[in-house]
Image: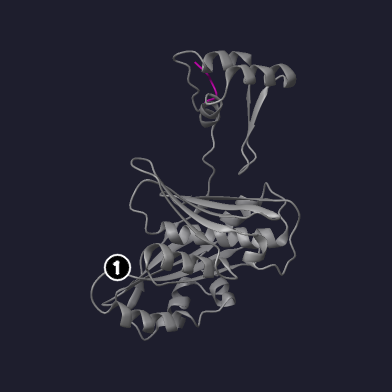
Amino acid sequence: MSNPDQIQRILFDNLDVRGVVTGLQQTCTDNFRNHDYPQRIQQVLGEMLAAVSLLSSNLKFEGRLILQAQGAGNVRLLLAECTHQNNLRAIARFDQAPADDSSFTDLLTDGQLILTLEPEQGSRYQGVVPLEGETLAQCLEAYFVASEQLPTQVHLACDGARAAGFMLQVLPAAGTAEQDWQHISQLGATLKSQELLELDNQNLLYRLFHQEDCRLYEPESLCFRCTCSRERSAASLKMLDLDELHQVLAEQGEIAVDCQFCNAHYSFDAADLQALFSPDGVSDSSGQLH
């Protein structure tokens, strides 16, 4: 397959086009391990993971990129995120298992695609467009044309156990971009989903562009890693009303915060609440409040 759990950018010499290819295998396994997703949900969520890793290849800040597809029907949310450290995670929220042959837009009634950039320093950016296209790849291509006026070609594939992605995009620069794009995008359009899943990156590059002057950058590793922590869970509790938290504690004996991405469980008792809401109360990563 495309090199598993790696992402590589493609450099075209003397062309105003950039490319990137990504492959996910153990990352998919780790992400799906704690969830009993139906086959179609697992396939499209794998595509979301591949897509967000492709999009994050252009990040020029420390932070994370979040790709969401929201709908008003059976599938309410598909979300994948990637940090600048190439840590990935994804989640789906749905009512019933969809049909295996459901298209991407069939899954998300009256859906929209949301791309969010969250730098650790600086302002948050969010772009929202309606879902236009039968596949996630087509929806992303429409997003880039509508939001950034950048011709973009996206290929995504997932068989449930592994996922892969390939993206070509015009460079926002003067020169021969339009002519370059017509040529390279025609070659890229011949890529088949099975080839994307089966060919390693070097063979994929040769298959598409053996007559071009292009090469692969050094690969970067990708992995599943959840960013949840007891400290973050405590911070979220601090945003709630203390009286309501005491009521939950009295009824349930603990305040439980569960991570929907990795199923981690964080428990808080009365002493934790007292420390958390004291003037200098903080929760550290070891789980101790002080």
Q: Quick check: can you spot residue 60?
A: yes
* Percent of width and height locating residue 14: 26, 77
Q: SS at mark 1? A: loop
Q: Residue furthest bottom?
A: 211
Residue at image location 62% in from the left, 59% down from the top: 110
Q: From what the image shows, is residue 67 above or below residue 248?
A: below
Magenta residues, start to end: 286-290
Quadrant of the rendered structure where residue 183 is? Answer: bottom left
Q: Is 288 within the magenta?
A: yes
Quadrant location, the N terminus: bottom right
Query: Which residue is disc 1 drawn over?
Result: 172
Q: Nearer the viewer, residue 50 or 250?
A: 250
Residue 11, quarter of picture: bottom left
Q: Position of residue 198 (x, y in %)?
A: 57, 73
Disc 1 residue type (three-letter): Pro
Residue placed furthest toward the left: 174
At x 39%, y 84%, the residue is 210
The crowd level at tag 1 (other Cα within 10 Å; few <14, some 14-19, many 20+) is few
Please say if 157 is above or below 189: above
Q: Position of residue 5 (x, y in %)?
A: 51, 59
| Residue 287 within the magenta-colored segment of the rendering | yes
